Amino acid sequence: MIAYLLSDAKFWTAIAFVIFVIAVFKPIRSLVIKTLDEKISDIKKEIIEAEKIKKEAEKLFYEIQRRQIKIIDEIKDINKDADSKIDYIKKEINEKFIKRISRQEELANQKINQIQSDAIKEIKEIVITLTLKTISEIISHKLDNTNKEKLIKLSLNDLNLSLKI
């Protein structure tokens, strides 16, 4: 049977195929291993790069969060400042408004007082004029000349006394 196998072409073809596979397997194996090692190395590099990018992204994320918190605090401070300025402006406007109203009220009171004093003067003038007219009519109708002269003298004396005082 061994002699038959040694003489059979199929046997030798199978042996040649096995030898060929063994001979080709080592270089192909080393080539495949080399290629796989390169792929593994590339994947490791990509993983390392991805980890670096992830760390940078996390740093950026935390930096953005920190800045966001800082900006929110700044916005709160700005709002507080704006509120205090608004309150100050409101107080200032109220004070100016009150001063203006009090000035206008004072001017109105002065005008009223002036109108009152003018009215009192006019009334006095009218009363004096009417009184003098009435007195002169009474004097001219009811007094005789001697009494008129006495009255004029007394009036002149009273006038002199009042002018001296």
Image (cartoon, rainbow, N blue to C red):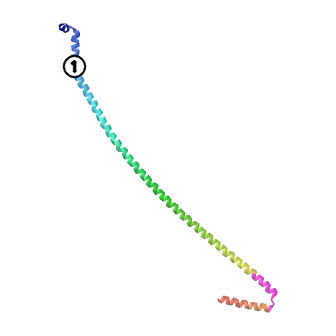
Instruction: Locate the C terminus and report the quarter of the image it occupies.
Output: bottom right
* Residue appearing at x 78%, y 91% in the figure: 147
Graded by Cα atoms within 10 Å as few (under 14), some (14 to 19) or many (20 or more), the crowding at tag 1 reads few
Q: Is residue 117 magenta?
A: no
**At which x and y percent is residue 22?**
21, 19
In this rendering, is residue 62 above or below 139? above
The quadrant where residue 120 appears: bottom right
Prevailing SS of the magenta stretch:
helix
Please tell me whether residue 50 is drawn above or below residue 71 in the rendered image. above
Asked if residue 24 is positioned above or below residue 81 in the image, the reply reads: above
Quadrant for residue 13, please give it: top left
Residue 80 as seen in the image, left or right of residue 60? right
Return the x and y of residue 127 as percentages of the image width and height: 73, 79
Residue in the picture at 23% in, 21% down: 25
Residue 137, given in percent of the width and then of the height, sits at 79, 84
The amino acid marked with disc number 1 is Ile
Farthest front residue?
A: 1
- Which region shows up in magenta? 131-145
Q: Is residue 66 above or below residue 46?
A: below
Please name the residue shown 54% across and 65% down the image.
96
Query: Element under label 1?
Result: helix
**Residue 136 % position (x, y):** 78, 84
Quarter of the figure that contains the N terminus: top left
